[in-house]
Image: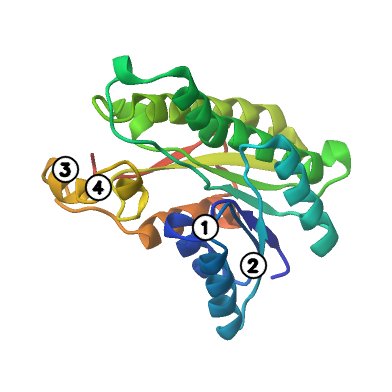
Amino acid sequence: MDKVMLITGASRGIGAATARLAAQRGYRLLLNYRSRADLAARLVEEIAAAGGQAEAVQADIADEAEVLRLFEALDRRHGRLDVLVNNAGMLEKQMRVEQMDAARLQRVLATNLIGTFLCCREAVKRMSTRHGGRGGAIVNLSSMAARLGAPDEYVDYAAAKGAVDSLTLGLAREVADEGIRVNAVRPGLIDTEIHASGGEPGRIQRLQGSVPLRRGGTPEEVAEAILWLASEQSSYCTGSFIDVSGGR
């Protein structure tokens, strides 16, 4: 395989698990990170030691200028893009809607929605047969919060991910005849550091009883769904969603 995959937010959690699995399957990787240069460098070394190819590029996808710089780095280093995985995301401390201010909403939307949108835009410019590209696949990371609403915790995050669902559907139909498939994965309660950033490291333990499978999921389980949607095995899927949520 000589395909190039760009993964945003790849230094840890679901992004890092996706990078490891993609490297095993022969993708050449450009791994984006925002602030954890140490983790990104360690992941690149791990992939190289296992015989894979990966490079890391710092960029905050909430900033349009940095998104452009990220894709310029992609052009210089690889000259092509076959798969974009829009994994970068963030949430803030748990609170109710009446406690949220506009600054928080702008931060949450900037990364989870606008950053994803901008990366999709740049990917389409490179993949679309309309622009001379060879086609490709985009996999967006949504969340079960988009369907459940995350009341009392992250309604702003849920709203952003609901918009990602709409973006996935609209873009999939817009570029379907240009060689690009656009799909999304909706993780549920997955064992990553994002829960600590929301102020509750033990959130999975508190909520896993509400999951029909009675446990939280792993980043590797989500990565398997992402890689399937990226692959030719899902060649007749676009505008589709895979819920990796234990039945929740």
Vertical comparison of 90 with 7: above or below: above
Q: Please state which amino acid type lies under the numbered disc 2.
A: Tyr
Task: Please say if 150 is above or below 182.
Answer: above
Residue kind at label 3, given as amino acid type: Leu
On the image, the x and y values in percent for residue 144 come to 34, 36
Q: First in sequence: mark 4 or mark 3?
A: 3
Q: CA distance from mark 1 to mark 3?
A: 27 Å
Residue for point 21% across, 46% down: 203
Q: Nearer the viewer, mark 4 or mark 3?
A: 3
Between the residue at mark 4 and the residue at mark 3, the CA separation in whole angstroms equals 12 Å
- Label 3 and label 2: CA atoms lie apart by 35 Å
**Residue 115 in view (yes/no):** yes
Mark 2 highlights which residue?
A: 27
Residue 22 visible = no
Which residue does the numbered mark 1 point to in the structure image? 227
* Helix, strand or loop for disc 1: helix
Image point 31% across, 43% down: which residue? 188
Label 4 crowd (10 A; few <14 / some 14-19 / many >=20) = some
Apparent side of residue 224 relative to residue 181 in the rendered image (left or right): left
Q: Residue 231 occupies which quadrant of the picture?
A: bottom right
The mark that comes first in sequence, 1 or 3, is 3
Q: Nearer the viewer, mark 3 or mark 2?
A: 3
Residue indicated by mark 3: 207
